[in-house]
Image (spheres, rainbow, N blue to C red):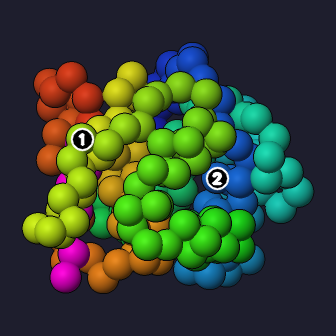
């Protein structure tokens, strides 16, 4: 179990902004699929030990929740199971598969040219902070670059988003590479995610 400090979690709870409750549903579904019912109980016990409660089973998908609690959830999950960073990325990549709405929505916006126009709007419906925009969309050379500004919350979420964006784009294209090419936690003014496909 990775050691977490109460003070670190309290500072995360001061992060401004909110996120939709669906993110906690996808966390819960991933833990259930990977660790079973006992795994979800361990998460809830660890949260309680720090004074937090997330009702993963009953939270409403469209409720607004503190963004800091979203990061606390990821860190607690990683801590309890000792997951490496690659597992957090995989968790992000799996999240859209658990959401019927996301799958339906993004298949609706196929082909890719149509989808990339919708992703920034979709972001604003799920987060109250951060601006997601397109930097480059080159259909001929099969390259797409997004930037995410004003969203410096925690490095663990950079990995999660890398996986998440990859899955969303895979609904319409066969990707060959996905990576965060710029990161605010490495001194860049914004996050940048680059994608290439066949």
Quadrant that contains the N terminus: bottom left
Mark 1 nearby-residue class (10 Å; few <14, some 14–19, many ≥20): few
Question: In which quadrant of the rendered image does the C terminus lie?
Answer: bottom left
> How many angstroms separate mark 1 from mark 2 (CA)?
26 Å
Residue at point 16%, 27% (across, down): 188
Image height of 19 relative to 83, above or below: above
Which quadrant of the figure has residue 38? bottom right
- Decide: few, some or many residues near mark 2? Use Cα within 10 Å; few <14, some 14-19, many ≥20: many
Can residue 16 be seen?
Answer: yes
SS state under label 1: strand
Residue 34 - label: none
The residue that mark 1 highlights is: 135
Residue 84 in view: no
Q: Which of the pair 87/170 is nearer the observer?
A: 170
Q: Residue at x 64, y 52 (%)?
A: 23
Q: Which residues are magenta?
A: 192-198
Which x, y percent locates residue 25?
72, 60
Left or right? Give the position of 112 relative to 195.
right
Which residue is tagged 2?
Answer: 23
Identify the residue at horizontal 84%, vertical 51% (top origin): 59
Residue at the extreme left of the image, as rendered = 141
Relative to 49, 137 lies left or right: left
Query: Residue sitting at 57 percent across and 75 percent down?
Result: 107
Give the camera-side residue of 57 and 145: 145
Front residue of this view, candidates 8 and 110: 110
The local secondary structure at tag 2 comes to: helix
Question: Marks 1 and 2: which is nearer the front?
Answer: 1
Question: Residue 90, position in %: x, y?
Answer: 40, 70
Our reading of the magenta stretch's main secondary structure is strand
Question: Where 83 sits versus 74, above or below?
Answer: below
Rendered image quadrant of residue 41: bottom right
């Amino acid at each position: 179990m990775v050691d977490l400090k109460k003070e670190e979690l309290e500072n995360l709870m001061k992060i401004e902004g909110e996120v939709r409750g669906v993110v906690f549903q996808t966390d819960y579904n991933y833990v259930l699929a990977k660790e079973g019912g006992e795994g979800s109980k361990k998460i809830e016990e660890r949260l309680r030990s720090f004074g937090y409660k997330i009702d993963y089973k009953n939270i409403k998908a469209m409720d607004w929740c503190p963004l800091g609690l979203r990061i606390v959830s990821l860190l607690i999950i990683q801590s309890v199971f000792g997951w490496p960073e690659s597992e957090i990325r995989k968790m992000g990549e799996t999240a859209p598969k658990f959401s019927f709405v996301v799958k339906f929505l993004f298949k609706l916006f196929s082909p890719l040219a149509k989808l990339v126009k919708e992703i920034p709007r979709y972001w604003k419906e799920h987060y109250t902070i951060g601006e997601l925009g397109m930097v480059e969309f080159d259909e001929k050379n099969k390259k797409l670059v997004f930037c995410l500004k004003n969203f410096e919350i925690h490095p663990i979420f950079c990995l999660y988003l890398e996986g998440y964006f990859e899955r969303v784009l895979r609904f319409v294209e066969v990707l060959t590479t996905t990576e965060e090419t710029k990161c605010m936690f490495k001194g860049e003014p914004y996050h940048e995610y680059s994608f290439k496909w066949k």
